[in-house]
Amino acid sequence: MPDPKPLLLIGLAVAASALPVTQRAAARGCRMAHPDLSIYAIELTDSDSAARQVGSGAALTEDTEDLPHARFVSSNGAQELILYAHFEAGVDEYAEAEVRVAGQEALALEPLPAEVFRTEHGIELGMSATDVIDRLGRCFKRHEKKRASEVLEYEIRGADRDPKLKRYGYPVYYAEYEFQNGGLVRFRFGFESR
């Protein structure tokens, strides 16, 4: 009688290869390759870099929709930068950041001397999903939203134990990238509030 182990192994390999790339990656415990920790030379939770780039004591908007945040617009009025402060944060300490296509209301915001808000790994609006994946890795979840948009979500649980992220002291790092018609129109990344 032939040994059934080789057939079992072949069956498992075929079943695993049928999974989507993100599920295969999650199954082997993958990690986001290159988490972004800065935008527009502002490092997450670093008050000195924030004060240097956007000034100290930026007015924070508080509402029931999201965390307290400061909003800025690019010099050409095309992009909006939103910096989020957790409730326990000190002055000028932003643990999350978002960049999106600026709406009409953003023209009233304080402009910063940059036409493009770019992360340390070169992520900026207009990029394709392939470009983002090439920079950040294949360990993500993909889902679709209404209005023909696609979202890629990355997450690092146990960030407070991760060699690169533990100094920030937050248990979860996340990043999400929204695409419409093949181009990046919004992205947000940082640490989930404790």
Image (cartoon, helix red, strand yellow):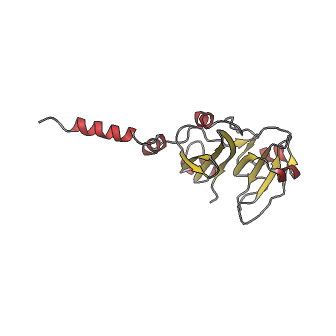
Q: Quadrant of the C terminus?
A: bottom right
Q: Residue 54: image x %, image y %?
A: 83, 46
Q: Residue 121: image x %, image y %?
A: 66, 35
Residue drawn 39% across the image and 40% down it: 18
Q: Quadrant of the N terminus?
A: top left
Q: Residue furthest left?
A: 1
Q: Name the residue nearer the viewer: 158 or 149.
A: 149
Q: Residue 7: image x %, image y %?
A: 24, 37
Q: Residue 147: image x %, image y %?
A: 65, 50
Left or right of 116, for residue 1:
left
Q: Residue furthest bottom?
A: 64
Q: Name the residue nearer the viewer: 89 or 192.
A: 192
Residue drawn 82% across the image and 49% down it: 72
Left or right of 83, for residue 29:
left
Left or right of 110, for residue 32:
left
Q: Is residue 132 above or below residue 146?
A: above
Q: Is residue 61 above or below residue 165?
A: below
Left or right of 49, for residue 31:
left
| Residue 112, quarter of the rendered image | top right
The total number of labels drawn is 0
Residue drawn 64% across the image and 38% down it: 182
